[in-house]
Amino acid sequence: MKKIFSVILVFFVVMGVTAQTITVLHSGDTVFSEGTSHFKNAENLLKKDFPNVKVEYIKIDLSDGSTLTMDAMLAAGEAPNVYLDTTVRTSKYMIPEYALPLENLVTDLKDYTPGNLDPYYINGHLLGIPVSGSAQGMAINLDMMKDIGFVIKPNWTISDFMKMAELVKQKYGGKKWATGMFAGNQSGDYLINNWYASFGAQWYKNGEYNKSIVAEKGAKVYEFFQTLVKNGYVPPNSATLVDDDYVIQWAKGDLAATAFFPSWTKPYFDTVIQQGIIKKPFNYEFVPFPRADGVTKVGTYFSGSIAVIHKTGTPADKVAARFVQYLNNNKTETLFAEEKGMIPDKIGIKDPSDPYTVQVMKIVATQGIFDFGLTDRRFTERRALQFPILQQVLNLKITPEVAIKKFQDALNGVK
């Protein structure tokens, strides 16, 4: 009788783990050429461990670039088991009160490149797992460079950029511009923020996110932005444009040199070709952002998806942790690198063959990553603070010194 009872007990314990439904809030699946997808690959592996598990997927509303879907689910008491999204939003939930520590649940941590997981340890606990990511570089329209007779040097300067900008203005007469600019909302702000690195203006020092130091050199950035506006080097209505305008301007070939991601190029080229705006993509390359005098390295922006698990204290936690582990399995890492231009974060994954991804990987290796405080829990709230100030800057309604002090005070006001 005791043996029968033990078998029954084991059965119910197993069923308690396997007969689970976990919910995944996400910003989108990725389909690969072999017909599989990011989520399907992970789910297939998961079901080998937990045959009866069911995974429900919920798509995020990205209309304003905020965490509105996640916030609404929390308010309704329906937190997803897994939140998979860009770091600029998931960092808000990488806090001990919400996130499940993963250091003892994810079993392949040793496979990650040394240092890659460091940003996701909070107070000694791993509260998030990176799931694909890429860095941006300055995308140079080589066809425009040929038209204006200008050659970009790999280690070019702000002075070089301004010479190029004037040549673009003279050649195209306000129909095309040296670079893009927008301040209509917070979405895509990283495309603009990389200019801080060009001027050596740090947002924080040595990972101390309680105090921003952006005003120490940041006025030079806003002064530069106003010069671009005054000289007609950016679209005249930049203050009201949004990132969607910016990326289409790039794909159309209207911007000479501007921030972009290698993985973005094909989708946006396809969009403008399908709309009949252009017939074929222009030639381009990726180089570091130009540097101001005295700046030796211009760190770039790294954008990655992070998976955060809501700790429930139930068997669903173990299932969710295994699902997150499988989201970044070696096969998927390889597919992301080879087909989507993502930078591998695990040991032994073959480098992508895409030459543009390799160019950006070189930028990361030589210039480093700029620290915007992405993994700090306050980043999401702080992110919304700059664009109203930037609108004033681009409309020439405020001085660079006053604007950057206002921005620094706003950052430091979020506790």
Image (tube, rainbow, N blue to C red):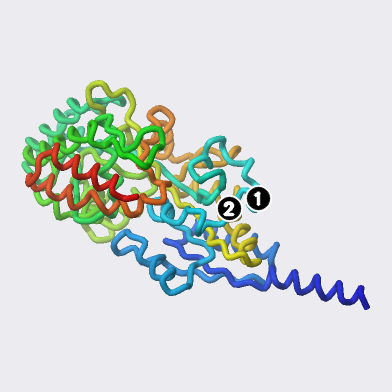
Q: Is residue 85 visible?
A: yes
- Characterize the local packing of mark 2: few (<14), some (14-19) or many (20 or more) Cα atoms within 10 angstroms: many
- Characterize the local packing of mark 1: few (<14), some (14-19) or many (20 or more) Cα atoms within 10 angstroms: few
Left or right placement of residue 181 versus residue 74 in this view: left
Give the SS element for disc 1: loop
Q: Please name whichever residue, 396 or 341, is drawn nearer the observer in this view of the structure.
A: 396
Picture layout, residue 39 above or below residue 237: below
Residue 214 x/y as whole percent: 26, 37
Q: Label 2, label 1: how many angstroms apart (C-alpha)? A: 8 Å
Q: Please name whichever residue, 200 or 249, is drawn nearer the observer in this view of the structure.
A: 200
Residue 121 x/y as whole percent: 52, 44
Residue 325 x/y as whole percent: 60, 53
Q: Which residue is mark 1?
A: 104
Left or right placement of residue 383 versus residue 146 in this view: right
Residue extending furthest toward the top? 294
Residue extending furthest toward the bottom? 1
Say which residue appears at 48% left-offset and 49% top-offset.
132
Q: Which residue is mark 2?
A: 101
Q: Is residue 269 visible?
A: no
Quadrant including the N terminus: bottom right
Image quadrant in which you'd find residue 180: top left
Asked whether the beta carbons under mark 2 and mark 1 sit within 8 Å of each other, the answer is yes
Left or right placement of residue 172 versus residue 346 in this view: left
Q: Please name whichever residue, 359 or 180, is drawn nearer the observer in this view of the structure.
A: 180
- Give the residue type at disc 2: Pro
Q: Which mark is residue 135?
A: none
Give the SS element for disc 2: loop
Say which residue appears at 58% left-offset and 41% top-offset.
112
- Give the residue type at disc 1: Asn
Say which residue appears at 43% left-offset and 55% top-offset.
90
Residue 382 x/y as whole percent: 31, 50
Say which residue appears at 54% left-offset and 65% top-offset.
81
